[in-house]
Image (tube, rainbow, N blue to C red):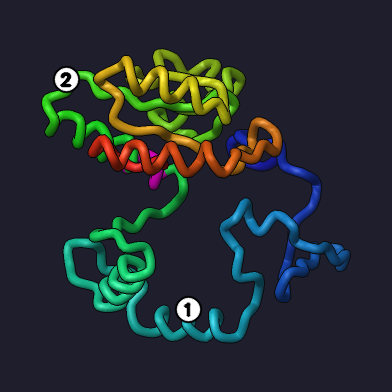
Amino acid sequence: MSHLMNTYARLPVAFSHGDGSWVTDTEGKIYLDALSGIAVSTLGHNHPDLVAAIAAQAGRLLHTSNLYRMPQQEQLADKLADLSGMDEVFFCNSGCEANEAAIKLSRFYGHQQGIDSPAIIVMEKAFHGRTLATLSATGNRKAQAGFEPLVSGFVRVPYNDLEAIRAIAGHNKNVVAVMLEIVQGEGGIHIADVDFSAWSASALRRKGMAPGL
């Protein structure tokens, strides 16, 4: 019997190694990896350049912390800022942590604007993570059940409904951000219209709010 907490309904398969887009289980059966570790292993498995880079870094330092400068981190931040046109970069360990940081930054911005209770527009059927704040932003009651009380400050609207966002943003002066997925995955495969995605980001920028997340 495993001592792992049963937080996932794991499938009865374990993988031993991979090559590119293919993975092999402990019984020798080969699979096409269409999941990529839920978008974590998007560079594939066993790429020689990636393996060499990881091995070289492991041979120098495994970890120092953000209390010190990291030249490679600064170089990557410069590259990302150059490509995106944005001013600053914040590195995270996961999408959940990135969304948590976005919520905090949005609230921080709201307080700077004199808003006591900043609000973030979120979508029905969305999934933003399993920390308490990102779970509260998630539009899936099944995922939230058992973890109440949830974090307040989220206003929920139907997904891909531009008029609903316009109505809330126009009448609720506490709105500081819109949090959305361009493609919803957990609630079914739902793809946002181009106009919906573009307006959500551009309208908030025009109002000086945080951009769409």
Residue 161, x across and y down, in percent: 55, 26
As drawn, the label of residue 54 is 1
Magenta span includes 100: yes
Nearer to me, 163 or 213? 163
The relative height of residue 84 versus residue 126 in the rendered view (above or below) is below
Q: Is residue 164 above or below residue 193?
A: above
Could you tell me which residue is drawn at 35 percent across and 27 percent down?
120
Q: Secondary structure at mark 1?
A: helix
- Check disc 1 and give the amino acid type: Ile
> Quadrant location of the N terminus?
top right
Image point (40%, 81%), residue name: 57
Q: Position of residue 137 (x, y in %)?
A: 44, 27
Magenta-highlighted residues = 97-101
Q: Earlier in the sequence, mark 2 or mark 1?
A: 1
Provide residue 136's location: percent of width, then percent of height.
44, 24
| The image quarter in which residue 7 lies | top right
Between circles 2 and 1, the one closer to the viewer is: 2
- Name the kind of residue labelled 2 in the image: Asp
Identify the residue at horizontal 60%, vertical 85% (top origin).
48
